[in-house]
Image (cartoon, rainbow, N blue to C red):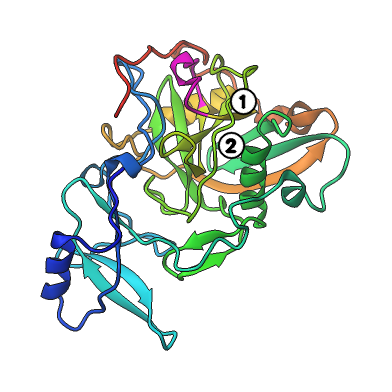
Amino acid sequence: MKRCAAVGNDGLRAVNRLRGWLCLPILFCGFACGKKEPPKPSAPPPPLPSVIATEDKPKATSSSGNIPDSVDGYQVIRARTKDGEIASMGVKAPRGWQVVQPPTEPDPHAGKFTIDEATKGLDKKGTLAAQIETSMGSFYCDLYADKAPNTVANFVGLARGLRKFWDSEKLAWIARPYYDHTTFHRVLPGFMIQGGDHTGTGQGFIGYNFPDELHPALHHDRPGQLCMANRGPNRNEAQFFITEGAAPHLDKSYTIFGQCEPATLVQRIARVPQSGPPGNTPLTPVTIDRVKIKKVVGGAAAWMPASAKLPPMPGVPPPGGVVPAPASNPK
C-alpha cells in the first residue's frame, strides 16, 4: 500500500504553486488502497468490489466527504486552523494515486461497534432484516448477525445513524443514516451490483475499517448474497455488493453477511445503461433511497410483500449463473 506521512515532492510543488494556501501533512493513497475491483463476467474476472485508480474514475462532484477538482486540475482539501476556522489548499497527486484526507480526530467508537449497540431499541424477537429501498424497487435481506456479527453491526449501525463515520468535508465524525441517498455506482451484468459509497464514486473514505468475517459455512454460491466490498484483506468500510451469479473465487476474500430477495432486482439494476469499463457506472443514477432495519418473525420473506417480487427479465438467463474464476488475483 502506497502511503507517506507528509506531502511528497509532487505535493510540495503543488503547494508552492498555490501561493497563500495552507501547508499541512497530506496522505496519498495509491491503487493498493482502493477497493479491489470486481471482474466483468464476460472475461476472467479479478476478485471483487473496488475503487479503481484515480485517473480511471469519474470525478466526484458532491459536497459530502469527497475531494473535488479545482479549475487547474489540483484537488482541494480542507484543514482546520488553530483558531478553529476551515481553510482550503490544493494538491495534485501523482498519476494513479488519489488524495485522501485522514481523520484529524480519533474514532469516537475506538474502532469497535457491537451488535448490541447497532440494534438498540429494536424488538427482541425475530430475525434481523433490512429493506434496501432503491429507485428501481426494494430488496429484503436477512442479516447474518450470528455468522458475521461485526459486519452486521457496522452495516446496521451506519444504516440507523448510530455508528459515526468521518466526513472529510466537515472535518468531523458524524452520525446520520449513512446509506440514505447513496447509489449503486458500479454494475456488472451476471455478476453483481456495488453501492454504499457516500461520494457516489467508489472512492469514499469513512475514517476506519474492520476485519473480514469469512464464515466456513458461507460460500459465494448463489444470487442475492449481501457482501462487503473492501480495500484488501481485513479492510472493510461501508461499501457492499449484492450478487447476481455464483462467484466461488470470492470465498476467501469477501465477507457474506446477508441474503437478499428478489435476485431479479439485481438483474434489472445490473443491466441499466452504463458507462462501460472501467467504471461501469449507471448513466442514470440508481439510488439507494433508504435502508430500514427491523426484527421480523419469519425474517425477510415474511416482510417482503408480493408486489416486491419480480419475474426474470425476458431474454436474460435467470440469476445464479457461475462467474468465471479469475486468471490471476490483483496485486
Few, some or many residues within 10 Å of mark 2 (<14, 14–19, 20+):
some
Q: Pointer 2 and pointer 1: residues touching (CB < 8 Å)?
A: yes
**Residue 261 % position (x, y):** 64, 26
Please, what secondary structure does the residue beneath circle 2 have? strand
Q: Earlier in the sequence, mark 2 or mark 1?
A: 2
Q: Image check: 212 left or right of 79?
A: right
Residue type, label 1: Pro
Question: What range of the chain is rendered magenta?
Answer: 243-254
- The amino acid pointed to by label 2 is Gly
Quadrant placement of the C terminus: top left
Judged left or right of residue 317, residue 227 is: right
Please say whether residue 96 is one of the residues in the magenta stretch. no
**Quadrant housing the N terminus:** top left
Q: Residue at x 55, y 31 (%)?
A: 227
17 up-or-down from 34: above or below: below
In the image, what residue occupies the spot 27% across and 52% down? 98
Of residues 225 and 300, the one drawn nearer to the viewer in this rendering: 225
Q: Position of residue 228 (x, y in %)?
A: 52, 35
Mark 1 residue element: loop
Gap in angstroms between the C-alphas marked 2 and 1: 9 Å
Q: Mark 2, mark 1: which one is toward the viewer?
A: 1
Which of 117 and 73 lies nearest the eye of the viewer? 117
Q: Position of residue 171 (x, y in %)?
A: 45, 70
Residue under circle 2? 137
Find out whether residue 252 is within the magenta segment. Answer: yes
Look at mark 1 in the image and give the residue it sits on.
262
Picture layout, residue 141 above or below residue 313? below
